Amino acid sequence: MSYLLPIFVASIRSVGTACTMASVGAYLHRRNFIVGNGKRTLALISQQVTIPAFLFTKIVYCNQDWSDLPCPDITNDLGDVWILLLWPAYVVSCGILVGYVAARLSHTPKEQYRS
C-alpha cells in the first residue's frame, strides 16, 4: 500500500499545477490582459514550443546529485516508444465506436451520424 503514496502525491501535484495555470489564465482573461489574437498566439506557443520542450526535458533529465555515476542511456528506452505510433489510431477508433454507440442508443437521426 505504501507504493500508492508517491503516485498519489504526483497526481495531486499535476492537478494542482493544472489548476494553478487555469486560474492564472482565467484571471488574466478577466482583467483583459489577454485579448483577441493574443489568446491564439499564447495557445500556439504553448502547443508548439513549451509543451514539447517540457516533455523533452523530462525525458532527458538526469539528476546527478554530485554522483560520479553516468546518466542512463536514453536510447535504450526508445525501443519502448513504438506504441506511440499506434496509439492515435487506437484512440480515434475507440472514439468513433463510442460515438456510434451513443448515437444509436440516443436514437440520433441518421443524417446527423457523421457530424
Image (tube, helix red, strand yellow):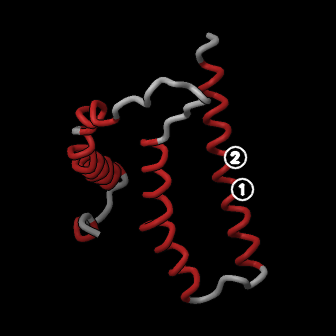
- Is any part of residue 91 visible from this angle? yes
- For the residue marked with disc 1, what is the amino acid? Thr
Residue pictured at 54% horizontal, 88% vertical: 37
Q: Quadrant of the N terminus?
A: top right
Residue pictured at 35% horizontal, 50% vertical: 102
Distance from the alpha carbon under mark 2 to that under mark 1:
6 Å
Q: Which mark is residue 86?
A: none
- For the residue marked with disc 2, what is the amino acid? Gly
For the residues bearing labels 2 and 1, Cβ distance under 8 angstroms = yes
Is residue 28 toward the left or the right of residue 81 in the image? right
The residue under label 1 is: 20
Q: Count the marks.
A: 2
Is residue 111 toward the left or the right of residue 1 in the image? left
Q: Furthest residue to the top?
A: 1
How far across and how far down the image is residue 96, in percent?
26, 53
How far across and how far down the image is residue 6, in percent?
63, 24
Q: Quadrant of the C terminus?
A: bottom left
Q: Quadrant of residue 21?
A: bottom right
How far across and how far down the image is residue 106, in percent?
37, 54
Residue pictured at 31% horizontal, 32% vertical: 77
Q: Residues within 10 Å of mark 1 (few under 14, many from 20)?
A: few
- Is any part of residue 104 visible from this angle? no
> Looking at the image, is 58 positioned above or below residue 18?
above
Q: Secondary structure at mark 1?
A: helix
Is residue 83 toward the left or the right of residue 31 in the image? left
Residue pictured at 51% horizontal, 80% vertical: 40
The residue under label 2 is: 16
Q: Quadrant of residue 82?
A: top left
Is residue 51 toward the left or the right of residue 96 in the image? right
